[in-house]
Image (tube, rainbow, N blue to C red):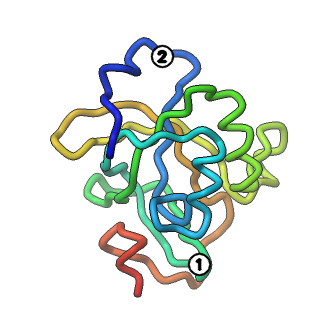
């Protein structure tokens, strides 16, 4: 069950939305950590990017074309400062040392199912993907 977007429109700064595409999604190995960070589901959608299979988790990277999309879910973090701090630890992101971080947190535009858009935080892989297999569907759940 998703919460209404209208309820959260007043929360503009800091951005309370986060887009998740892998182990933090419903049914994922780390989904409980998103819930513990206060995450409440809003909608399904896609972002521009390419998705790679690193084995235990996926890696989103910036797309070089306009067609590549990554499928995921948007959550609202009512206390975005505390919630994002928890998720940063889960994702290995350190805003003071971005170049050393496993993932980097960036604001992206999410196209929600139904066509509306909103800005949300998303974690992008911050290392070379090397020999990782690309998931052309953009769907982490389709890897098996």
The residue most toward the top is 10
Q: Residue reaching furthest left?
A: 114
Question: Residue shown at 40%/21% (left/top)?
Answer: 8
Mark 1, other Cα within 10 Å: few <14 / some 14–19 / many ≥20: some
Instruction: Return the mark for residue 39.
Output: none
Residue 138 at x, y percent in the picture: 35, 67
Task: Name which of mark 1 and mark 2 comes first in the sequence.
Answer: 2
Location of mark 2 (residue): 11
Instruction: Name the residue: 73% across, 59% down.
Output: 102
Give percent across and percent down for residue 92. 75, 55
Viewport quadrant of the C terminus: bottom left
Q: Which residue lies at the image location 42% right of the left edge and 63% below the top edge?
A: 50
Foreground mark, 1 or 2? 2
Q: What is the spatial separation of the Cα atoms under label 1 and label 2, in whole angstroms?
A: 34 Å
Q: Quadrant of residue 137?
A: bottom left
User: Along the horizontal axis of the image, is 105 left or right of 107?
Assistant: right
Q: Secondary structure at mark 1?
A: loop
- The residue carrying mark 1 is 54
The answer to whether 119 is drawn above or below residue 29 in the figure is: above
Of helix, strand and loop, which one carries label 2? Answer: loop
Left or right relative to 143: residue 91: right
Q: Is residue 10 left or right of residue 58?
A: left
Question: In the image shown, does 69 or 18 lie closer to the viewer?
Answer: 18
Q: Quadrant of residue 57?
A: bottom right
Where 59 falls versus 134 (above or below)? Answer: above
Image spot of residue 121 (x, y percent): 53, 38
């Amino acid at each position: 069950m998703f919460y209404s977007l209208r309820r959260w429109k007043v929360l503009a700064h800091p951005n309370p939305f986060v887009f998740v595409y892998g182990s933090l999604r419903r049914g994922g190995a780390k989904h409980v950590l998103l819930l513990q960070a206060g995450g409440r589901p809003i909608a399904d959608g896609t972002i521009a990017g390419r998705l790679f299979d690193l084995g235990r988790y996926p890696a989103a990277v910036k797309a070089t074309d306009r067609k590549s999309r990554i499928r995921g879910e948007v959550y609202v973090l009512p206390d975005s400062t505390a919630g994002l701090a928890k998720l940063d630890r889960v994702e290995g992101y350190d805003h003071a040392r971005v170049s050393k971080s496993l993932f980097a947190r960036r604001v992206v535009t999410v196209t929600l199912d139904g066509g509306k858009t909103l800005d949300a935080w998303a974690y992008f892989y911050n290392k070379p993907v090397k020999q990782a297999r690309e998931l052309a569907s953009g769907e982490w759940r389709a890897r098996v």
